[in-house]
Image (cartoon, rainbow, N blue to C red):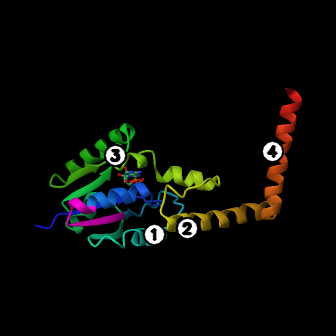
Amino acid sequence: MKRVAIYPGSFDPPTNGHLDLIERGSKIFDELIVAILRNPEKDPLFSVNERRQMLESMTAGFENVSVDTFHGLTVDYALRVEAQAILRGIRAISDYEYELQMALMNRKLQPGLETVFMMPAAKYSYLSSRLVREVAQLGGPVECLVPELVVRKLREKMDVANKFSNADAGVSEPEARAADRAAAERKIKSRKKKS
Ligand code: ADP
């Protein structure tokens, strides 16, 4: 029998940690379906289509990995695609409690379906989509955290967001940067005066 697993998640955006897990999962399952949850309650940075495109490019080299989207219960989706397992990642103890709860709930809903946990390489154990979004939004480097294609997509998003917020404030991008610099210099000067 073909061993099929789904790897469900938000992937907003997909990171090197996700990719690490996909690679590990692709080695132990015959078929791995990366399944993006369409959650209308969340306000994502990337649309489902954008996330799908990024994941498809990232996983193009894996013959037994495909990308799909779903909504509703994960167990119902797993049943529909005839998967026997749900793959999830555990980074630190902090992930464990929530993941355990979810795995046990899924087992109650669908006893035949197993949840398989895998750990990423240690260097990705601190990495989350939320952290990547925050670093990118504050203009920090994300090159080692996500694939090159995601770096580009994040930059595009941030450029658009900056344009809108500066336009709202009625200032151009160079003016906004000059104002930030002047404010920082004023702060340093006033600190020097005090000391
Ligand atoms: P969700 O909203 O379902 O947690 P995520 O995209 O954040 O969606 O995560 C999907 C799955 O990938 C989860 O099992 C999560 O623990 C795992 N994961 C996320 N980041 C990493 C990482 N850096 N290393 C390993 N697993 C990860």
Q: Earlier in the sequence, mark 2 or mark 3?
A: 3
Task: Classify mark 3: residues with Cα within 10 Å, few (<14), some (14-19) or many (20+).
Answer: some
Residue type at numbered disc 2 = Lys
Q: Is mark 3 within 8 Å of ligand 1?
A: yes
Labelled disc at residue 184: 4
Name the side, left or right, on which 80 lies relative to 45: left
Q: In the picture, which quadrant includes the C terminus?
A: top right
Give the distance between the C-alpha atoms of the residues marked 2 and 4, in whole angstroms: 29 Å
Q: Is mark 2 within 8 Å of ligand 1?
A: no
Q: Is residue 112 above or below residue 26?
A: above
Q: Are marks 2 and 4 in contact (CB under 8 Å)?
A: no
Residue type at numbered disc 3 = Ile
Q: Is residue 73 among the parts visible in the rendering?
A: no
Magenta-colored stretch includes residue 32 = yes
Q: Earlier in the sequence, mark 1 or mark 4?
A: 1
Task: Classify mark 2: residues with Cα within 10 Å, few (<14), some (14-19) or many (20+).
Answer: some
- Picture coordinates of residue 68, whole percent (x, y): 35, 70
Query: Which residue is disc 3 drawn over?
Result: 90
Q: Are marks 4 and 3 in contact (CB under 8 Å)?
A: no
Q: In the picture, which quadrant includes the N terminus?
A: bottom left
Name the side, left or right, on which 74 lies relative to 169: left
Residue type at numbered disc 4 = Ala
Q: Secondary structure at mark 2?
A: helix
Query: Which residue is disc 1 drawn over?
Result: 54
Query: Which residue is disc 2 drawn over?
Result: 153
- In the image, which residues are magenta? 26-35
Of all residues shown, which one is farthest toward the top? Answer: 195
Q: Quadrant of residue 101?
A: top left
Q: Are marks 2 and 1 in contact (CB under 8 Å)?
A: yes
